[in-house]
Amino acid sequence: MGNHACPSVNQPMERTDVRVLAQLTDEVFAKERLQALVVELRKRIESSKDDQQARVNEINRRIKQVEERQQRLLDAIESGIVELDETTQRRAQQIKTAKEALHIELAEVRRDASIPALDRLRPGQIDTIGKVLRDRLNSPDLAIAKSYLSQLVDEIVIKEKTLQLKGSYFGLAEAMLKVKVDTKSVPTFNLDWCARRESNPRPSASETDTLSS
């Protein structure tokens, strides 16, 4: 669409890559901030449990209703009140399909609730994971760095002199769990963390970061 379609000037890819990775390692996943992100992640997991349980209860209620309709239809057929014809068979199949769909929905809700648990991680263990995570983002092998980048960051937006990174708390939890498994040293509503930084090689003291959902 041409340069007029974008408010930013052209940015060299390699230089931009270095800046993005530097912001992640030096600011977003710095020791103190990572501790704060984990605290926020734990709060969001806890607050989401009630919502997830409410969804489970509602789906179970609907499954019970479908099962009652299914049983009433079978009772009517067995007692001779309703004739077993094509219409009845079609209705029985519809009820069966609805029941199967609800069981699939229930399984998905329970799967979504399985965000990697970080509640047993001590501050020292989080620091260890953070160091390994920063080392991998700083890896001279750009393929390794970008593999973690793709898991941690969902969107990168450059506007004029501002670089904005967005990622999910779920992605952060998964990345931390991956580090744990790989190193064997230490032990999932759309939840987003958001960090805004100037796109200079190093951030200034006036730059801020926020969490948003």
Image: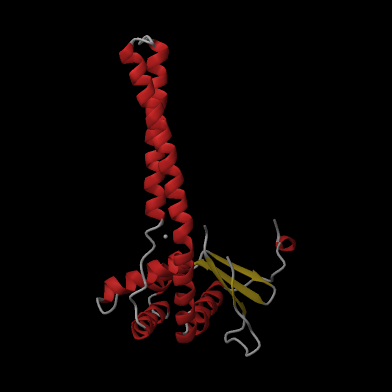
Colour scheme in use? secondary structure
At a point 29% along the width and 78% down the height, the residue shown is 186
* Residue 61 appears in the picture as rendered: yes
Residue sitting at the far bottom: 205
At a point 37% along the width and 53% down the height, the residue shown is 111
Q: Estimate the x, y position of residue 30 in percent, counting from the top left.
A: 47, 84
Q: Estimate the x, y position of residue 206 in percent, counting from the top left.
A: 66, 88
Residue sitting at the far left: 184
Q: Nearer the viewer, residue 72 or 107?
A: 72
Compared across the picture, whether 188 is left or right of 161 comes to left
- Specify the quadrant of the image occupied by residue 163: bottom right
Q: Is residue 183 above or below residue 150?
A: below
Compared across the picture, whether 163 is left or right of 42 comes to right
At a point 36% along the width and 73% down the height, the residue shown is 119
Q: Nearer the viewer, residue 211 or 163?
A: 211
Q: Estimate the x, y position of residue 131 in percent, counting from the top left.
A: 38, 84
